[in-house]
Image (cartoon, grey):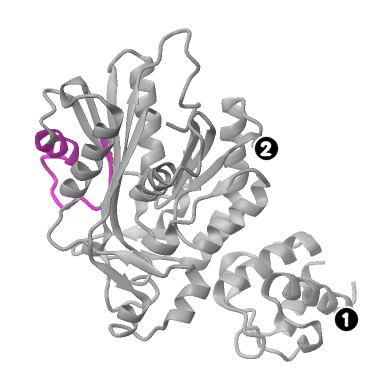
Amino acid sequence: MTRDEITAGLAEILEEVAGVSPDDVAEEKSFTDDLDVDSLSMVEVVVAAEEKFGVKIPDNDVQNLKTVGDAVAYIEAQS
Amino acid sequence: MIALGHYQPSRILTNDDLAQIVDTNDTWIRERVGIVTRRIADTETVADMAAAAADKALANSGLAASDIDLVVVATCSAVDRSPNTACRVAAKLGIDAPGAFDVNTACSGFSYALGTVDHALRAGAARNAIVIGAEKLSDFTDWTDRSTCILFGDAAGAAVVTASGDDEPAGIGPVVWGSVPERSDAVRIEGWRPYIQQEGQSVFRWATTALAPLALKACERAGVAPSEIAAFVPHQANLRIIEGIAKRLDMPQAVIAKDIIESGNTSAASVPLALSKLVERREVPSGAPVLLFGFGGGLTYAGQVVRCP
């Protein structure tokens, strides 16, 4: 799966879970500051991402995923 | 289960009130946890609230105090080590010589206590029991911590449960209970002087992913299809957790208890409090199957299907 495909998949999840417009999703965007994803929505995004991409993202790693690009890289490394 | 009752202190604490104490606001609290108000005890103790709820349940049951031979209180916030809350409740209600003990599994306490009472009745150890969830969490709230002090409230809820005859259908289904001991740090009221602390994201994830299959197992054990469940009464921890679990359960007929909005998180009191209010408002028909499910500190969980009084 390419980085663009992972980003597109995350955009779908962000739209469903947190109502984020897919047009706003880009690798440099911060979940909290730019996309207004709160800490509990972030958990929902992570759980959905685990299911969609078949990866494991433990609680301790979630706090390191500041930007969409961080999440894309994390998922890419496991897939 | 033949009757319910509940008690809440009269003092209402709003989100705007909390915004005067810590850096927070109404919109933030509503969006994150769905709470609008909570009740805070003034002079009432855990035992006072437990007895008030039990008194109402007893009045609704038509039984007399002298009929009761077992009192079990679920609580994690009773300050006194001895006597236990159950003995204090029995004394206040004038119940003579009941079996009386407390159960502490934090927020899952009511379903643990109800399961234990059900077993005692089936074993013939008692005929008529009162099971109570009662908490004064305001005693253990850090009013300088905006991540936790917005969550909790004080309350009690009680149920009168009687032994059924051999040819009567069971009113309380088999309890599904368990724990995740390796996650004991996720919710804590530790040390002296203790305050409630929790790993919010971690608990949220566990609650919204691990619990729905366990709740469905309680339906299966009771022989009730999820589509038949008339009401789902989970521990009132956070509106987003309640909605997250409910979505995974897919119970289209079920009324979903959302007392969290007006009462906050009252730990072991939340399930009987929410159930008592649903019954009082006649939102669930008598005899209809209701799924109770508690979860929280320990981590612990317990749930069962009961027939609505």
Q: In the image, residue B124 lies at what x, y percent?
A: 32, 12
The local crowd at label 2, few if under 14, some if 14 to 19, many if 20 or more residues have their Cα within 10 Å, is few
Q: Which quadrant of the figure contains the N terminus of chain B? A: top left
Q: In the image, residue A75 lies at what x, y percent?
A: 76, 71
As drawn, is A35 to the left or to the right of B48? right
Residue B263 against residue B29 in the figure, above or below: above
Q: Residue at x 41, y 83 (%)?
A: B25
As drawn, is A33 to the left or to the right of B81? right
As drawn, is B267 to the left or to the right of B226? left
Tag 1 subunit: A
**Residue designated by label 2:** B227
Q: Residue at x 34, y 27 (%)?
A: B161
Q: Which residues are magenta?
A: B72-92
**Mark-to-mark CA distance, 1 and 2:** 41 Å
- Rendered image quadrant of residue B50: top left
Q: Which quadrant of the figure contains the C terminus of chain B? A: top left
- Rendered image quadrant of residue B259: bottom left
**Residue designated by label 1:** A4
Q: Residue at x 35, y 44 (%)?
A: B105
Task: Please name which of the two marks, 1 or 2, marks the residue nearer to the observer.
Answer: 2
Relative to the observer, which residue lies in front, B151 or B41?
B41
- Tag 1's secondary structure? helix
Residue B28 appearing in the image: yes
Q: Which mark, residue B309? A: none
